[in-house]
Image (spheres, helix red, strand yellow):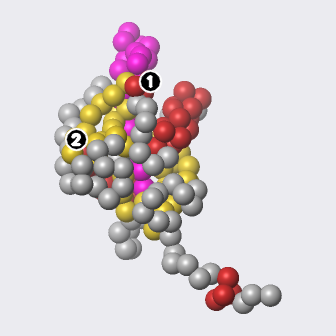
Amino acid sequence: MLNVSEQHTSAAPDITTDVVVFSRRMNTGHLEEPIQVLLVRRKPDSDAYPGAWALPGGYLDPGERLTTAARRELREETGLDLTGGPLRLVGIYDDPERDPRGRVITVAYMATVDDCPPVHGRDDVDAAQWVPVQEATGLAFDHGRILTDAEWQFWHTRW
């Protein structure tokens, strides 16, 4: 039998947060389609998925709460400030192969905004853009799965 120190020989995983932001437009009291999602394009010199489209997100800082990290990363990468706005948990994504840089667990959140507020790529991304959900394909990491899960919650749960 292995003792505890022998069982856990690898470094602790990194923790990130990702945010799925949907833009909803109302037309005479009804939700207008297509629903838009906010994506960021990773810089060409990024250490993982260079130039690929992804959900806004990034690493948790020491001593930081998960929701604080999610809001901070969203603001840093897109300029969109959701301070005080509700974030809903989409899920925890822990596939050991989800990130080519190593073991990374992400906690994904979702939020909705009205219309499509202006955004711009900042910090470690090249661009930020609103895209119809149906066109958000080929995303970096496991962000396609996260988006699918968030979209299901968007349509099947009450906000």
Counting from the top left corner in percent of width and height, residue 26 is at: 37, 17
Residue 55, label in figure: none
Check disc 2 and give the amino acid type.
Ala
Residue 127, label in figure: 2
Q: Could you say which quadrant of the image residue 136 lies in?
A: top left
Magenta part of the protein: which range? 17-36
Tell me what residue is drawn at x 43 percent, y 32 percent: 137
Mark 1 = which residue? 134
User: Left or right of 151: which side holds 51?
Assistant: left
Crowd around label 1: few <14 · some 14–19 · many ≥20 (10 Å): few
Tell me what residue is drawn at x 51 percent, y 61 percent: 105
Image vertical order of residue 4 relative to residue 93, above or below? below
Q: Between 50 and 68, which is closer to the camera in this rendering?
A: 50
Tell me what residue is drawn at x 42 percent, y 55 percent: 17
Secondary structure mostly taken by the magenta-highlighted segment of the chain: strand
| Element marked by disc 1 | helix
Counting from the top left corner in percent of width and height, residue 57 is at: 36, 52
Q: Residue furthest right?
A: 1
Residue 109 appears in the picture as rendered: no
